[in-house]
Image: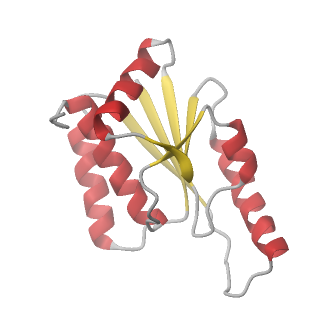
Amino acid sequence: MKIYIIAVGKIKENYISDGIVFYLKKSRPYCEIEIKEVEEEKAPQNLSEKEKKEILRKEGERVLSKIKKRSFVVSLAIEGKEIDSYKFSQFIKATFQSGYREMTFVIGGSLGLWENIKKQSHLNLSFSKMTFPHQLMRLILLEQIYLAFSGENHL
């Protein structure tokens, strides 16, 4: 089982990097996880809607170039389907049991995720109606992946 996390931008905070390393190590007995970063476009304040769409397109094309054809793709999007930790665990296990050998989770940048990626994904998933910084979302996702495999979600 292989899980890819494709994320826009680099981690800038040490505490987030430390947490990512922590959960990557804890997850090793269960699955292989690889994080692929793509460059984030500079997004000055007061962008027009056209400028925002262009930035999302550029980032999105970089993301699409990293997605493998046979991977089950999950985009993290605030408007996506909400599930609890137990159902997330069941979902991951069922996806691999259905014959997929790879899952790819996609995390957008500070402006979100290009619509074309969401349309091409097998699932758009929301961890909450709240907005989380995209860097922190990597850590949250890794923690949930670890819980899914380890059975520590206690539900």
For the N terminus, give its image quadrant: top left
Q: Is residue 105 above or below residue 87?
A: below
For the question of whether residue 77 can be seen, the reply is no
- For this rendering, which residue is in front, 23 or 56? 56
Whether residue 144 is situated above or below residue 20 in the rendered picture: above
**Placement of 106 over or under 32, stated as above or below:** below
Which quadrant: the C terminus?
top left
Residue 148 located left or right of residue 131: left
Task: Give coordinates of residue 89: x percent, y percent.
Answer: 32, 30
Tell me which residue sits at (41%, 58%) in the image: 137
Residue 153 locus on image (x, y percent): 20, 37
The residue that appears at 73% across and 51% down in the rendered structure is 115
Quarter residue 65 falls in: top right
> Residue 108 appears at what percent x and percent y?
58, 58
Q: Is residue 90 left or right of residue 53?
A: left
* In the displayed structure image, the side of residue 57 where residue 133 appears, left or right: left
Task: Left or right? Give the position of 82 relative to 112.
Answer: left
What residue sits 63% from the left and 68% below the top? 111
- Count of all numbered marks drawn on residues in the image: 0
